[in-house]
Structures are given as C-alpha cells and as structure tokens.
Amino acid sequence: MSAVSKVGVIAIGTDELSIRPKMPISRLFYLMGYSRAPGYWRDEDVSLSSDCELVSSIASSFIRQVKNATVQGLLQGYRTVHEAVPMIRGRLDVAAQIGRRAGLPLPAEVSYDDYTVDVAENRLLLSAARTLLTVPRIPESDRQSLRKLLLKFDGVAAIARGSALPEIQFTRLNAHYRPAVVLAQIILRHGSLEQPSGKVRARAFLFDMWEVFEDFVSVALREAMGSSDGRIDLQYTGKHLDVGAKVSLRPDIVWHNDNVVLAVLDAKYKAEKNKRFPNADLYQMLAYCTRFKMKVGHLIYAKAENDELLHEIDGADIHIFSHALDLEARPENLLQQVQNLATKIVNHSNVAA
C-alpha cells in the first residue's frame, strides 16, 4: 500500500505487526532529533545497527540516555506552587483569598517557590518511561530497566495524556539532560497509544514518516536560510485561496519579508499517487504560487528517481521545482544538501526576480 507511511508496532490481542523503516534506525533518530534540537543532535547520539527493531532501539537508547543524565541524581529547580494552607507561607494571594475564601482568614491561599525534583525535564522523562512500558515488542530486560528508572522519579508528576509538552530552555545547569529530554519528546510526540473499548486489547506505537520528514525539512531549511534577509515561518496559516475565504492555505514553509512572500515550499515524504487526483502536489503548489503571486514554487521529496525536475506551467509564468533529499546520506552530507537547496531557493526567489 503506497499510502502507508507509518513505522512502529501495532498489537491487537495476541497478534502483533511490526513495520520497519526503510532507512537505518539511527538515521530516523537523527531526523527526529534534529527537528527537536537543530545544531545539537548528532548521528552518534544513537549508534544502532540497521537490523535492530525500532521500538526496542528506542527503549534501549532512552534507558541509556536517562541513566547518563541522572547518574548524579535528579535535576532540581524552583517551581511556583499555589495552594491553600493552614498558615501563611510565602506570599498571600489576595485575589484568590477573596475570590475563593470570601474573605475568611484561613485556609490561606498562598504562592511560593519550592526547590523540587518535580520540574519539566523530569516530568518528560517519567512520562516517556511510562509510555514505553505500554509498548509491545520491548524486551523484558528493557522493561525491568524502565521499572527501575521509575523508582528514581519519586516526587515527580507525570504529564497528563493529551496535554501540551513543556518546552525546555537548555542552559549549563540542565545541558546534561538534553539527549534524554529530546528522546522523551520524540517518544511522547510521535508515539500513539490506543485502547478502544471492548474485550480485545489494542495498542500501537507509531511514527508517521510524513511528519518526521516534514519536520526535519522545515527546521533544517529554517536553519540554512537563517542568515538570509527575511523571515522563515513554518506551517504558514491565515491565508485563503478565494475571495470568500472558504479555501484555506497552509504551505509548510514560507520565506517572507515585510508581508512580501519571497518563496513558498512544501515538503512531501512521497509523491502523491492518488488515481482520482493525479499530480495533486503540483496543483497544490500552483495554488500557492497563484495566491502569493510567485513565479517559482518548490516541492521537496525524499530521495526519488530524479534528483530535480522542473515543471513549467503552460499559459502562466510559473515554474515548479521538485527537489529530492537523500535521507540515507551521512548527517553532514544531508545538511549540505539542504544548504544547497536553500541557495537554489534564494536564487529563484522573488528577490532575484
């Protein structure tokens, strides 16, 4: 099935289906890690053989990184606490006291800074470890290691399922947590767990290759074009194709300056092969070019038979380039491909025109 682009594992009852990526697992990790921490994540952060199972590789790598991060103990930090107490501690929250206690003196609504292990970094690691324990096909030895890790996080609250993941600002104080936190964010962001009602238990842990590819291309191009004039926006919204604003547009990447669009790009893991709507990617890019008054549009795919194709639109002064990135290239070579692509985009932009 050409439309299938997920990798991971699905378990329904006692039956399991494992979907392996075509690329080496370490390269898949690199793409996901770079999207979370560009300029930091390295290919050697996850050194795995290509024949490893994806989910077991994730588990073993996560365990190793968490152990490295917490070898000297859990990270601690200050967290603002709001609570009702029998005596005043810290600062009295006057508005909460009046609103919730109708002016009664006790209990007192207070806020104070608590030095605790219950910080965002530890919450991410704890939540990711709990998530991995529900995933099929993880070796029992890794499950035992995950259970032991959970004991370290006494006093840490897990992130509620469905809640937004906290964004971490790294400094010299928490830099040693970075590899583990990036992996935790990957696990919690890309892992999907389903438990439908009924007698048959179903579990899934899946990564969407479309999303992995689009995230990497978007972030890598933003980094590559950072020195160029203008601003890079990802998942550009708020624009419509028609006057009545009924058809919304959302290109993956827009490079613009003072509300003038300089280049518009879309990242596609695979070329669209819908028999009912052939060449849908080209039609979509043509709509972007028409709306933003662009003479050139760019489609970016994973490695294909042709490195680059040019489509000159008949009856319109519009050219659409189809570029391809070799995802199996070494990270430094892959980033050089992105840099070369960024140079082409700048040369073909409305600035050059």
Image (spheres, grey):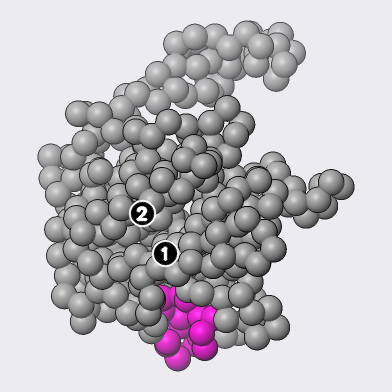
Instruction: Identify which residue, 209 or 120, lies in the foreground.
Output: 209
In this rendering, position of residue 284 left or right of residue 208: right
Query: Does residue 139 appear in this view?
Result: no
Mark 1 Cα-neighbour bin, 10 Å: few <14, some 14–19, many ≥20 = some
Residue 106 belongs to magenta span:
no
Local secondary structure at mark 2: helix
Q: Which residue is pictured at 75% across the width and 51% down the height? A: 241
Q: Tell me what residue is drawn at x 45 percent, y 62 percent.
A: 300
Q: What percent of the width, then of the height, locates residue 298?
A: 50, 57
Find residue 114 and report its horizontal and vertical position in percent: 37, 22
Q: CA distance from mark 1 to mark 2?
A: 8 Å
Task: Tell me how many marks there are.
Answer: 2
Kindly identify the amino acid type of the residue bearing the numbered disc 1: His
Judging by the rendered image, the residue that carries numbered circle 1 is 323
Identify the residue shown where x is 42% and y is 31%.
229
The label number, if any, that marks residue 341 in the structure image: 2
Which segment did they paint magenta?
A: 1-17
Mark 2: which amino acid? Leu
Residue at 54 percent of width and 61 percent of height: 320
Residue 193 visible from this viewpoint? yes
Say which mark, if any, is on residue 257: none
Residue 179 in picture, x, y percent from top left:
23, 48
Which element type, helix, strand or loop, lies under badge 1?
Answer: strand
